[in-house]
Image (cartoon, rainbow, N blue to C red):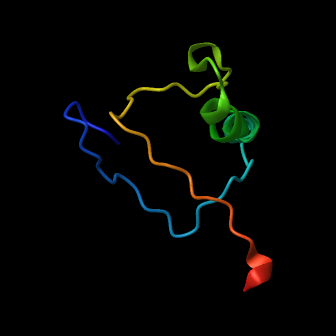
Amino acid sequence: MVDTDMRVWLIEVNSSPSMDMGTPTTERLVQMVLTDLPKVVIDYPNARNRNNCDTGGFQLVYRAPYEVSRPQAVNLSSF
Protein backbone atom coordinates (compact mmCIF):
# COMPACT_ATOMS: atom_id res chain seq x y z
CA MET A 1 0.00 0.00 0.00
CA VAL A 2 1.19 3.55 -0.68
CA ASP A 3 0.22 6.30 1.75
CA THR A 4 -0.37 9.98 0.99
CA ASP A 5 3.35 10.71 1.49
CA MET A 6 4.23 8.06 -1.12
CA ARG A 7 5.68 5.72 1.50
CA VAL A 8 5.23 2.05 0.65
CA TRP A 9 3.86 -0.24 3.35
CA LEU A 10 3.83 -4.02 3.27
CA ILE A 11 0.33 -5.05 4.28
CA GLU A 12 0.24 -8.77 3.51
CA VAL A 13 2.55 -11.71 2.97
CA ASN A 14 1.24 -14.91 1.40
CA SER A 15 3.11 -18.13 2.01
CA SER A 16 1.51 -19.66 -1.05
CA PRO A 17 -0.03 -17.03 -3.34
CA SER A 18 -2.08 -18.28 -6.23
CA MET A 19 -4.33 -17.14 -9.01
CA ASP A 20 -6.97 -19.65 -7.97
CA MET A 21 -10.43 -19.24 -9.47
CA GLY A 22 -12.26 -20.97 -6.61
CA THR A 23 -15.10 -18.46 -6.32
CA PRO A 24 -17.09 -16.44 -8.86
CA THR A 25 -15.45 -13.24 -7.59
CA THR A 26 -11.87 -14.51 -7.82
CA GLU A 27 -12.62 -16.10 -11.20
CA ARG A 28 -13.69 -12.73 -12.60
CA LEU A 29 -10.76 -10.87 -11.01
CA VAL A 30 -8.13 -13.40 -12.09
CA GLN A 31 -9.41 -13.37 -15.67
CA MET A 32 -9.30 -9.56 -15.70
CA VAL A 33 -5.75 -9.46 -14.30
CA LEU A 34 -4.47 -12.06 -16.74
CA THR A 35 -6.00 -10.12 -19.64
CA ASP A 36 -4.91 -6.65 -18.51
CA LEU A 37 -1.44 -7.32 -17.13
CA PRO A 38 0.25 -7.71 -20.56
CA LYS A 39 -1.31 -4.38 -21.57
CA VAL A 40 0.49 -2.70 -18.68
CA VAL A 41 3.78 -4.59 -18.87
CA ILE A 42 4.20 -4.71 -22.67
CA ASP A 43 1.96 -2.14 -24.33
CA TYR A 44 2.09 0.80 -21.90
CA PRO A 45 5.90 1.25 -21.74
CA ASN A 46 6.09 1.17 -25.55
CA ALA A 47 3.07 3.36 -26.27
CA ARG A 48 3.65 6.59 -28.17
CA ASN A 49 0.75 8.27 -26.40
CA ARG A 50 0.44 6.82 -22.91
CA ASN A 51 -2.60 8.96 -22.13
CA ASN A 52 -4.65 6.93 -24.64
CA CYS A 53 -3.04 3.53 -23.99
CA ASP A 54 -5.47 0.77 -22.99
CA THR A 55 -4.45 -0.52 -19.55
CA GLY A 56 -7.67 -2.41 -18.85
CA GLY A 57 -8.67 -2.13 -15.20
CA PHE A 58 -5.27 -0.82 -14.08
CA GLN A 59 -4.88 2.89 -13.36
CA LEU A 60 -1.70 4.89 -12.94
CA VAL A 61 -1.96 6.48 -9.50
CA TYR A 62 1.55 7.94 -9.23
CA ARG A 63 4.25 8.86 -11.73
CA ALA A 64 7.75 8.93 -10.29
CA PRO A 65 10.06 11.74 -11.40
CA TYR A 66 12.19 9.12 -13.19
CA GLU A 67 11.75 5.72 -14.79
CA VAL A 68 13.83 2.65 -14.11
CA SER A 69 15.55 1.68 -17.32
CA ARG A 70 14.90 -1.78 -18.66
CA PRO A 71 17.84 -4.17 -18.80
CA GLN A 72 19.40 -4.72 -22.18
CA ALA A 73 18.94 -8.06 -23.89
CA VAL A 74 21.60 -10.60 -22.98
CA ASN A 75 22.84 -13.26 -25.35
CA LEU A 76 22.80 -16.35 -23.13
CA SER A 77 24.42 -18.53 -25.76
CA SER A 78 27.77 -16.85 -25.06
CA PHE A 79 27.91 -18.26 -21.52
Q: Position of residue 73 (x, y in %)?
A: 68, 61
Q: Position of residue 51 (x, y in %)?
A: 56, 15
34 w.r.t. 55: above or below: below
Q: Position of residue 50 (x, y in %)?
A: 58, 20
| Picture quadrant of residue 23 | top right
Residue at 75%, 47% (x, y): give it.
21
Residue at 38%, 29% (x, y): give it.
62
| Picture quadrant of residue 47 | top right
Left-right relation of 3 to 52: left
Q: Position of residue 39 (x, y in %)?
A: 70, 33
The C terminus lies in quadrant: bottom right
Residue at 34%, 51% (x, y): give it.
11
Which residue is farthest right? 77
Viewer-nearest residue: 34 or 14: 34
Which residue is farthest left? 5
The N terminus lies in quadrant: top left
